[in-house]
């Protein structure tokens, strides 16, 4: 049986095989995202440290590591200490599986898809850490930058396009940050958000950056309204709106551009 890369790619291009494989990998990487989003803000090792219960510290066994199913079988509790396990774990895993399936359906099997899958993992981790800790880890920013370079390379973009979008995003974010400071005398955009604008520009380029800003603002307004009603807080994490807007522009570029110019 041929196990060459070409043969595997051809096999995955069959919808009946490729889609289930991408969904399974989405669940697995969703499990990684839940772990990384917990450990990165706490500066814990995300590679070599074994998976363990965050309540009793018991090392998790093989049957504890099946995404979604282990949580469901154990009724949402640790198998060892019986402490409730947050539903964010299976929800994150399911969300990742859905996003992996969308990438497969939109892009197929290619180097571009690899870059997009890497971005999806990074953005899910970013959303969770920003919601829970109000930070976007630098490790995630660097990973997005690297996947952005792969993405641009897969599209045969010129080197100048790599950096023009990044510089445009960085310049815009810095102007927004310090302009808001001069106007209101308080921080309007965190440095994590500023860095994200730059790495988002690497992926999007100048062409899609304006739709990205438009949808980020619209989603930010919607999200802030929900956040204030639920959390009763005036300040809200902007990262989820940025991440969702970026995915919208990259996975559905034709719709995002058309909608932007329609409402412009």
Image: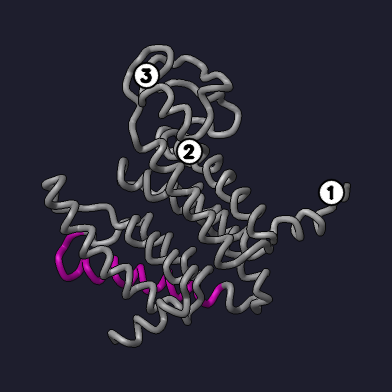
Q: Position of residue 259 (x, y in %)?
A: 35, 81
Q: Is 22 displayed left or right of 120 in the figure?
A: right
Identify the secondary structure beneath mark 1. Answer: loop
**Range shown magenta:** 163-186
- The residue singled out by tag 1 in the image is 3
Q: Residue at x 15, y 45 (%)?
A: 231
Tell me where residue 27 appears, x and y as whole percent. 52, 42
Residue at point 59%, 33% (across, down) = 47
Q: Is residue 172 above or below residue 11?
A: below
Q: Relative to residue 163, is residue 80 drawn left or right?
A: left
Q: CA distance from mark 1 to mark 3?
A: 43 Å
- Is 242 situated above or below 236? below
Disc 2 to disc 1: CB gap under 8 Å: no
In percent of the image, x 35 and y 87: which residue is there? 261
Which residue is labeled 3 in the image?
55
- Tell me if mark 1 has few (under 14), some (14-19) or many (20+) residues whose alpha carbon lies within 10 angstroms of its own: few
For label 3, count other residues whose C-alpha is less than 10 Å away and answer few (under 14), some (14-19) or many (20+). few
Residue 49, above or below 176 = above
Where is residue 118? Give x, y as percent: 57, 54
| Residue labelled with disc 2 | 36
The local crowd at label 2, few if under 14, some if 14 to 19, many if 20 or more residues have their Cα within 10 Å, is: many
**What colouring method underlies this structural image?**
one colour
Q: CA distance from mark 2 to mark 1?
A: 31 Å
Instruction: Answer with the quarter of the image where residue 153 lies.
Output: bottom right
* Distance in Å between CA atoms under marks 2 and 3: 17 Å
State which quadrant residue 223 falls in. Answer: bottom left
- Quick one: SS at disc 2? helix
Sequence-first disc among 2 and 3 = 2
In the rendered image, the residue lying farthest to the right is 1
Which mark sits nearer the N-terminus, 1 or 3? Answer: 1
Q: Earlier in the sequence, mark 2 or mark 1?
A: 1
């Amino acid at each position: 049986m041929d196990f060459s890369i070409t043969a595997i790619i051809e096999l995955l291009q069959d919808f009946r095989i490729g889609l289930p494989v991408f969904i399974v990998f989405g669940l697995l990487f969703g499990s990684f995202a839940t772990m990384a989003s917990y450990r990165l803000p706490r500066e814990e090792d995300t590679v070599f440290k074994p998976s363990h219960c965050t309540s009793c510290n018991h090392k998790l066994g093989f049957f504890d590591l099946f995404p979604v199913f282990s949580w469901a079988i154990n009724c949402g509790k640790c198998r060892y200490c019986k402490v409730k396990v947050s539903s964010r774990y299976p929800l994150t895993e399911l969300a990742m599986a859905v996003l992996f399936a969308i990438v497969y359906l939109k892009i197929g099997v290619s180097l571009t898809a690899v870059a997009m899958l890497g971005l999806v993992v990074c953005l899910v981790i970013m959303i969770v850490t920003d919601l829970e800790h109000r930070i976007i880890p630098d490790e995630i920013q660097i990973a997005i930058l690297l996947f952005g370079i792969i993405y641009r390379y897969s599209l045969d973009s010129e080197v100048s396009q790599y950096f023009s979008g990044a510089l445009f995003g960085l310049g815009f974010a810095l102007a927004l940050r310090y302009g808001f400071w001069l106007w209101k005398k308080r921080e309007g955009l965190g440095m994590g958000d500023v860095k994200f604008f730059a790495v988002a520009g690497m992926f999007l380029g100048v062409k899609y950056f304006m739709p990205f800003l438009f949808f980020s603002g619209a989603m930010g307004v919607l999200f802030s309204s929900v956040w204030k009603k639920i959390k009763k807080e005036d300040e809200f994490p902007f990262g989820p709106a940025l991440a969702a807007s970026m995915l919208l522009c990259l996975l559905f570029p034709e719709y995002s551009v058309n909608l932007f110019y329609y409402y412009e």
